[in-house]
Amino acid sequence: MSIMTIHQLHTVLLSLKQLEKKLPEERFYRINRSIIVALDHITAFDDFQVRLGEKSFPLSKRYQKSLLNRVTILQADASE
């Protein structure tokens, strides 16, 4: 599996499920079967895709509603 950061690509010997368990839940979110994103790098999203800067990634229907709830919570926390 590969992990893409702002600066480089890393290869790791973990499954995505194992990696997801190790990442802090409040900072990362799985958007489809094969992609986890850092919440603070999301610049926009709709029902079909998540944008991180200039890059777009597909958003699975399975994760749409909970992503909206997570972002709403993050916005509420930021305004307090």
Image (spheres, rainbow, N blue to C red):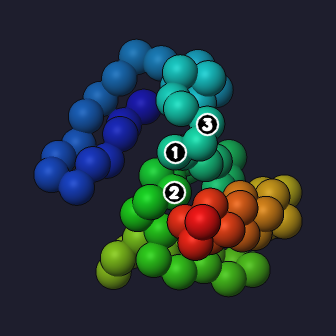
Residue 55 % position (x, y): 38, 74
Q: Earlier in the sequence, mark 1 or mark 2?
A: 1
**Looking at this rendering, what residue extends furthest in the front direction?**
80
> Is residue 71 something one can see in this rendering?
no
Q: Are marks 1 and 2 in contact (CB under 8 Å)?
A: yes
Q: Please name the residue shown 53% across and 32% down the image.
A: 24
Q: Which mark is residue 39?
A: 2
Type of residue at label 3?
Answer: Glu
Q: Which residue is mark 3?
A: 25
Mark 1 to mark 2: distance in Å? 5 Å
Classify residue 2 by image quadrant. Answer: top left
Q: Is residue 56 left or right of residue 66?
A: left
Q: Which residue is mark 1?
A: 27
> Is residue 51 something one can see in this rendering?
yes
Quarter occupied by the N terminus: top left
Q: Is residue 3 left or right of residue 77?
A: left
Q: Are marks 1 and 3 in contact (CB under 8 Å)?
A: yes
Type of residue at label 1?
Answer: Arg
Type of residue at label 2?
Answer: Leu
* Mark 2 surroundings: few (<14), some (14-19) or many (≥20) residues within 10 A: some
Mark 1 to mark 3: distance in Å? 6 Å
Q: Earlier in the sequence, mark 2 or mark 3?
A: 3
Residue 21 % position (x, y): 61, 23
Q: Please name the residue shown 75% across and 80% down the image.
A: 47
